[in-house]
Image (cartoon, rainbow, N blue to C red):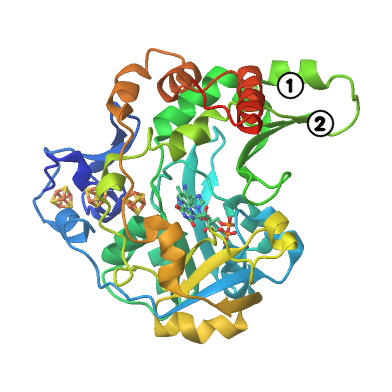
Amino acid sequence: MLTLTDKTKCCGCGACANSCPKNCIAMVADEEGFLYPQVDKSACVNCGLCEKVCPILNKPQTFPVLETYAAKHKNAEVKLKSSSGGMFTALAEVILKEGGVVFGAGFDKEWNVVHTYAENLTDLDKLRRSKYVQSDTENTYQQAKQFLEQGRKVLFTGTPCQIAGLRNYLGKEYENLLTAQLICHGTPSPGVWSAFLKENFNKNDIKNINFRDKHFGWSANYLSFLFSDGLLCAHGMRRTLAEKLFERVPGKRKIGYIYRNVFLRAFLAELISRRSCFVCAFRGKENQFADFTMGDLWGKWPEIITSQDKREGMSVLTANTAKAKHLLNSLSLVTQPIDFDRVARINFPLLSSPVAHPKRAEFFARYRTENVSKLIRELLDIKPWWLAIINKGYNKVLTLLKIKRP
Ligand SMILES: Cc1cc2nc3c(=O)[nH]c(=O)nc-3n(C[C@H](O)[C@H](O)[C@H](O)COP(=O)(O)OP(=O)(O)OC[C@H]3O[C@@H](n4cnc5c(N)ncnc54)[C@H](O)[C@@H]3O)c2cc1C
Ligand code: SF4
Ligand code: SF4
Ligand code: SF4
């Protein structure tokens, strides 16, 4: 039976809960808002399966990176609908074409991030785009197994630890299973996400959420909220404020904009990610868990990235198995071989874990009783947007006059 004494040793993949024959493991949110297994000891029969499938206690077979590419989907529309260069869609298309099923992270009705599946191209859109919140895998490992046993092709996508959890849960390799892992920097707390939404929006009024809105280009990183009446708020601006600022363009699709993109800022500053992400066991060139690895092609690549790519997005894709290498040519992609080590120098989560923000513990001690947005602004010292603009101008003047800031 699982006994969890060190929280850094659970990535929340849910393999244990999916595997328990007595259904006596529930995934329950802790005080930081992350899911951990809770065992009903009275129902447990000590079969040991939960420990056997845990990818932290027992790593599945790992794969080395075999080939690395700069890659983009051939269709510009797909790229604009995706977070990076549309790798996920390219993989999903080949599986769906053969009557297969695609698993990935979507939203539920409450805008929580959960794993689910799509069986056609229309449904696929709910799985597109990064959601920077830890996804609840629920019973998707069981569902994937059922489809595999029926002989259907399955594409399962997620964080590296989720893919490792799935493979342990399955317990054997399936010819009809294809897996793709994200380059994973860390995953923010679902509890913090829920509190952030609650204090800023009426969830029923939200029609869509995009963590990587490309209105201002691929690397601009805008978190946007689309409301039922067509109002689009970028950077998590309060709806009421956006309405005030943009009421002068009635009938048009309006875009609100604000500097204080607090949720993404907290994610990138390592304030709100899971403890296991800071000592992640699922990184490394020889330590891949899926057939493919996909991420953003960050860094300077003037010989590859055009101005069009800067608007639409560009990915890095690695093939880690013979299955992946074989499939590459049938994907709807434009690819160019690149050097893995050069990619990893910029995209460090491929090889090493980030360091937690020094105020992470303080954040989690206070977030349940305080306003999350305000707390993030305080701990990360985020200035109001108007002060940030003044500061920027002031700094520019000092630089022009070659004066050192006091
Ligand atoms: C939490 C998180 C951290 C990331 N960190 C990095 C990083 O440090 N460096 C980097 O290069 N790329 C990172 N990525 C990956 C990147 O943001 C894109 O998701 C990736 O490049 C795929 O983009 P795409 O255009 O091919 O497909 P898209 O259509 O954008 O596909 C999205 C894919 O991501 C999956 N996904 C989305 N949200 C989640 C989630 N919460 N949990 C599990 N799976 C999810 C979907 O299932 C789908 O497979 C991260 C993604 C997430 C979700
Ligand atoms: S030991 Fe077996 S019965 Fe007990 S919690 Fe683990 S999987 Fe379930
Ligand atoms: S199987 Fe996954 S969720 Fe369960 S204890 Fe191990 S890491 Fe945690
Ligand atoms: S950083 Fe590692 S532990 Fe954290 S979600 Fe990603 S793969 Fe899992």
Locate residue 308 relative to residue 301 in the image: left or right.
right
Locate residue 338 relative to residue 18 in the image: left or right.
right
Locate residue 401 relative to residue 272 in the image: left or right.
right
Q: Are the residues at dot 2 and dot 1 in contact (C-beta closer than 8 Å)?
A: yes
When the figure is inspected, residue 1 is found, relative to residue 158, above or below; the finding is above
Mark 2 is on which residue type? Answer: Lys
Disc 1 on helix, strand or loop?
helix
The mark tally for this picture is: 2
Q: Give me the residue at 58% from left, 68% from top.
A: 92
Q: Give me the residue at 47% from left, 84% from top.
A: 325
- Residue topped by disc 1: 242
Q: Earlier in the sequence, mark 2 or mark 1?
A: 1
Looking at this view, is 332 or 248 the one in front? 248
Disc 2 on helix, strand or loop?
loop
Residue furthest out toward the front: 402
Q: Give me the residue at 31% from left, 65% from top.
A: 284
Query: x, y (%) of residue 377?
Result: 48, 21
- Residue topped by disc 2: 254
Query: x, y (%) of residue 76?
Result: 75, 63
The quarter of the displayed image where residue 108 is located: top right
Query: x, y (%) of residue 56?
Result: 21, 56
* C-alpha span from label 2 to label 1: 9 Å
